[in-house]
Amino acid sequence: MAARILHRLRHALAGEAGREEPAGGGGEAEDCPESSELEDDTEGLSTRLSGTLSFTSHEDEEEEEEGDGASEELEEPPQAPGAAAGTEDGEWVSAAERPGGSLLTRQLQELWRRSRGSLAPQRLLFEVTSASVVSERSSKYVLYTIYLIRSGQFDKAPATIARRYSDFEQLNRRLRCRFSCDMASVAFPRKRLRRNFTAETIAKRSRAFEQFLSHLHSIDEIRRSPEFLEFFFLPDLQAAQRLTCTGMYREALATWANAYRLQDRLGVCSSGRFLLTLAGLAVCHQELDQLSEAHGCCEQALQLLEAQGSHPLLGPFLQTHVHLAWKVGKDKRRSEARLQDLREAGLPLQQQPSLKECLIKEPLE
């Protein structure tokens, strides 16, 4: 996308603004498809897919040449030859300050500076990054790996999910039962009796799933519904809980962290599931002797619980926070004062389960 914008800017700045793009040249598919099956979109999509897919997209190759290696994200401006590296605060030295600096580079940099502060908040994007054929004992299916990306931003650690067709089909069915009117215009790729594992079918379904999730996310009631939200992070929470119960803390930590990023991208950082995720992170960090990280998770949870007089996790979080604060040399007086308030209110703290016990006993269905 950025490569295409830069290509147009070059022509505009060179006095060729009158020349228009050829009709239909590389236009993106609509975010809300109205048909039950999309047109063939293997070109332009498949070059992003790894796993079993190995297509070549002439359109992407042309854009790469025209963009001179420009990044697909607008969060980082393209680094032109001769330009200085960017600084931490986002400001960077113009190539015009160096001998031989080009007018085009200066104009692009100035355009970037002006537009950076005025960009409106971008929507959440869903991008299939790989599709792999998985063969198990008596079954064979395609597993689609999807990144959740905030448009216009760069995520150092992306939030990811891996789902198969039947998972998407179950989500579609549940949402149509509850939101029949809203779902009337939402397209879903139909089943096929044959050729489910061909590269063409996988590429078309990948694009269809991207558009399906984007359309769902654009509808307010569906975006906030438990059915939609838990499709993303509930499997990770269940897997992380199992790993924690069996003492596989390093593996559990990675899964809790991905569940954290998923909930962050989806904007549900004040829910009970998110508090449970922070508990999982705190427990795993503590078990792995990463005490500062565990302390930070407890502090974040206590900030969320600040306005709540009582919560099943409040006492366990306070006790864990006091213990960790003493270990890492941080101030623990506020947490001790809150614990004293709970004692005076009659809460039997000695009988309360630990944070780890709460985590293990929490039913996740």
Image (cartoon, grey):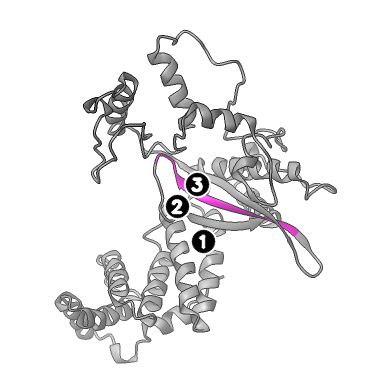
Q: Nearer the viewer, residue 108 or 137?
A: 108
> Quarter-wise, where is residue 77 in the image?
top left
Q: What residue type is labelled 3?
A: Glu
Front label number (1 vs 3): 1
What's the residue at 74%, 58% (across, down)? 141
- What is the spatial separation of the Cα atoms under label 1 and label 3, in whole angstroms? 18 Å
Whether pointer 1 and pointer 3 mark residues with C-beta atoms closer than 8 Å, the reply is no
Residue 132: percent from the left, percent from the top?
68, 55
Residue 195: percent from the left, percent from the top?
82, 47
Q: Quickly name the residue at label 1.
A: 233
Q: Which amino acid does label 1 sit on?
A: Phe
Q: Quickly name the residue at label 3.
A: 221
Query: Please, which residue is most extreme toward the bottom here?
Result: 350
Q: What residue type is labelled 2?
A: Leu
Task: Categorize mark 2 by other alpha carbons within 10 Å: few (<14), some (14-19), many (20+).
Answer: some
| Mark 1 or mark 2: whose residue is earlier in sequence | 1
Label total for image: 3
Front label number (3 vs 2): 2
Residue 79: percent from the left, percent from the top?
36, 35
Magenta-colored stretch includes residue 73: no
Q: What stretch is highlighted in magenta?
A: 141-152
Q: Quickly name the residue at label 2.
A: 266
- What is the spatial separation of the Cα atoms under label 1 and label 2, in whole angstroms? 10 Å
Residue 312 visible in the snapshot = no
